[in-house]
């Protein structure tokens, strides 16, 4: 093989190797970002839980668990009819 053809083939192989390296590097980062985002949800399912006092609570971040049921505070009759 003459020198000119050797340089062209070498340069072409080098370009292909660089292009493949860039392609795999970028695709690897995207997969890593997808794994990280699946571990940290940005939204929770929209279902609700009905508490014993019939109030509804929804899920909250970061673990998407239901919020605590509110405790019922019964005001005394004196507080309701206060002058």
Image (cartoon, grey):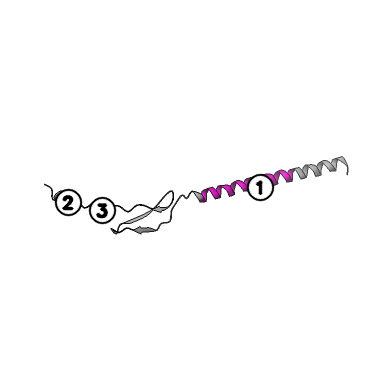
Please tell me which residue lies in front, 21 or 66.
66
User: In terms of sequence position, does the residue under pointer 1 or pointer 2 come before the other?
Assistant: 1
Q: In the picture provided, is 82 more to the left or to the right than 50?
A: left
- For label 2, count other residues whose C-alpha is less than 10 Å away and answer few (under 14), some (14-19) or many (20+): few
User: Residue 81 location, x and y as percent?
Assistant: 13, 50
Tell me the residue that label 1 is attached to.
24
Mark 2–mark 3 distance (CA, rounded to whole Å): 13 Å
The tag on residue 44 is none
Q: How many marks?
A: 3
Q: Which label sits in the foreground, 1 or 2?
A: 2
- For label 1, count other residues whose C-alpha is less than 10 Å away and answer few (under 14), some (14-19) or many (20+): few
Q: Does the magenta stretch mainly form a helix, a strand or a loop?
A: helix
Please tell me which residue lies in front, 34 or 63.
63
The quadrant of the image that shows the N terminus is top right
35 is within the stretch colored magenta? yes
Q: Residue drawn 58% across and 47% down?
A: 32
Tell me the residue that label 3 is attached to.
72
Q: In the picture provided, is 68 more to the left or to the right than 2?
A: left
User: Residue 54 location, x and y as percent?
Assistant: 29, 59
46 is within the stretch colored magenta? no
Seen from this angle, which residue lies furthest right?
A: 2
Please tell me which residue lies in front, 56 or 75.
75
Q: In the picture provided, is 17 more to the left or to the right than 44?
A: right
- The kind of secondary structure element at disc 2 is loop
Mark 1–mark 2 distance (CA, rounded to whole Å): 69 Å
Q: Residue drawn 73% across and 45% down?
A: 17
Tags 3 and 1 in contact by the CB under 8 Å rule?
Answer: no
User: Residue 3 location, x and y as percent?
Assistant: 86, 40
Tell me the residue that label 2 is attached to.
76
């Amino acid at each position: 093989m003459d020198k000119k053809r050797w340089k062209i083939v070498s340069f072409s192989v080098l370009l292909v190797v660089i292009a493949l390296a860039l392609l795999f590097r970028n695709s690897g980062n995207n997969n890593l970002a997808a794994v990280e985002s699946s571990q940290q949800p940005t939204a929770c399912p929209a279902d609700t839980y009905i508490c014993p006092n019939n109030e509804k609570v929804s899920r909250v971040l970061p673990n998407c668990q239901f919020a605590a049921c509110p405790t019922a505070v019964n005001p005394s009759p004196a507080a309701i009819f206060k002058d």
